[in-house]
Image: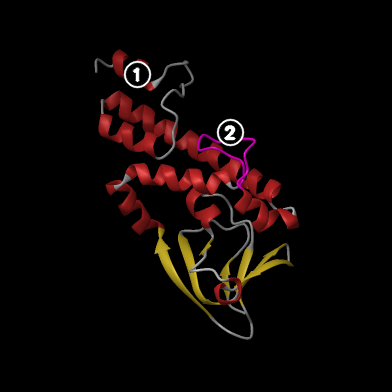
């Protein structure tokens, strides 16, 4: 079959399967197959963990050898354009994706794992592995976002600060000197 996503890669596309079958494997072992016609699903989303969190893809995804798959594709570039217009929506979507794996937007583990996630991957024991990939990616993203947040605070750019906060960065995060964004802005005269 045709390779759609390789395990360990970072995805810049979100796929919505409309027709056909996609097989998911981990280290060469088949984990599950997804076919909207057989499972009464409308265009299931494929690759959302890696796409929304910049985590390594937890599975290799291949099109069924005997058939084909038709997917609608949302590129990361187009998604980022949408989040510039509706920044609060990214936080909502990201929280929904993360809650399936018991993680919040700041990268903290939560006790709550949505039932949908349990039904989807827990039988194969995948949630702890995927959660670890997500936590690693969120820690890296939070470090990068903190840098952007501090730069915006130094420049007094409140629009950029709000954008970064809506993307999931904790406004109360401190820099290496223990200063929050508010401290930095006050120190810089804003």
From the viewer's side, name the closer residue of 142 and 91.
91
* 148 or 99, nearer to the observer: 99
Lateral position of residue 83 relative to residue 39, left or right? left
Identify the magenta region.
101-114
Between 70 and 118, the one lying in front of the other is 118
Compared with residue 69, is residue 11 higher up or lower down, i.e. above or below? above
Chain-order first, disc 2 or disc 1: 2
Give the distance between the C-alpha atoms of the residues marked 2 and 1, in whole angstroms. 23 Å
Q: Quadrant of the N terminus?
A: bottom right
Which residue is under mark 2? Answer: 108
Mark 2 secondary-structure assignment: loop
Q: Is residue 38 magenta?
A: no
Using the rendered view, name the quadrant where residue 22 is placed. bottom right
The residue carrying pointer 2 sits among few (fewer than 14), some (14 to 19) or many (20 or more) residues within 10 Å by Cα, namely few
Q: Residue at x 40, y 61 (%)?
A: 75
What residue is rendered at 30% in x and 35% in y? 160
Q: Is residue 105 magenta?
A: yes
The prevailing secondary structure element of the residues shown in magenta is loop
* Residue pointed to by mark 1: 182
Is residue 11 depicted above or below 143 in this figure?
Answer: below
In the image as oriented, which residue stretches furthest toward the bottom?
Answer: 66
Q: Position of residue 63 (x, y in %)?
A: 59, 76
x then y, percent, for residue 98: 55, 45
């Amino acid at each position: 079959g045709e390779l759609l996503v390789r395990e360990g890669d970072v995805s810049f596309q979100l796929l919505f399967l409309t027709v056909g079958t996609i097989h998911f494997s981990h280290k060469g072992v088949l984990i599950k197959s997804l076919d909207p016609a057989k499972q009464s699903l409308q265009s299931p989303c494929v690759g959302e963990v890696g796409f929304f969190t910049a985590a390594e893809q937890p599975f290799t995804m291949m099109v069924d050898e005997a058939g084909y798959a038709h997917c609608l594709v949302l590129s990361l570039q187009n998604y980022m354009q949408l989040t510039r217009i509706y920044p609060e929506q990214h936080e909502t979507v990201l929280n929904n994706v993360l809650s399936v794996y018991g993680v919040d937007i700041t990268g903290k583990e939560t006790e709550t794992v949505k039932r949908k996630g349990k039904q989807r991957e827990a039988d194969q024991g995948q949630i702890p592995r995927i959660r670890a990939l997500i936590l690693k990616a969120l820690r890296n993203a939070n470090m990068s976002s903190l840098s952007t947040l501090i730069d915006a605070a130094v420049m007094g750019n409140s629009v950029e600060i709000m954008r970064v906060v809506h993307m999931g960065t904790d406004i109360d995060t401190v820099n290496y000197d223990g200063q929050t964004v508010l401290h930095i802005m006050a120190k810089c005269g804003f």
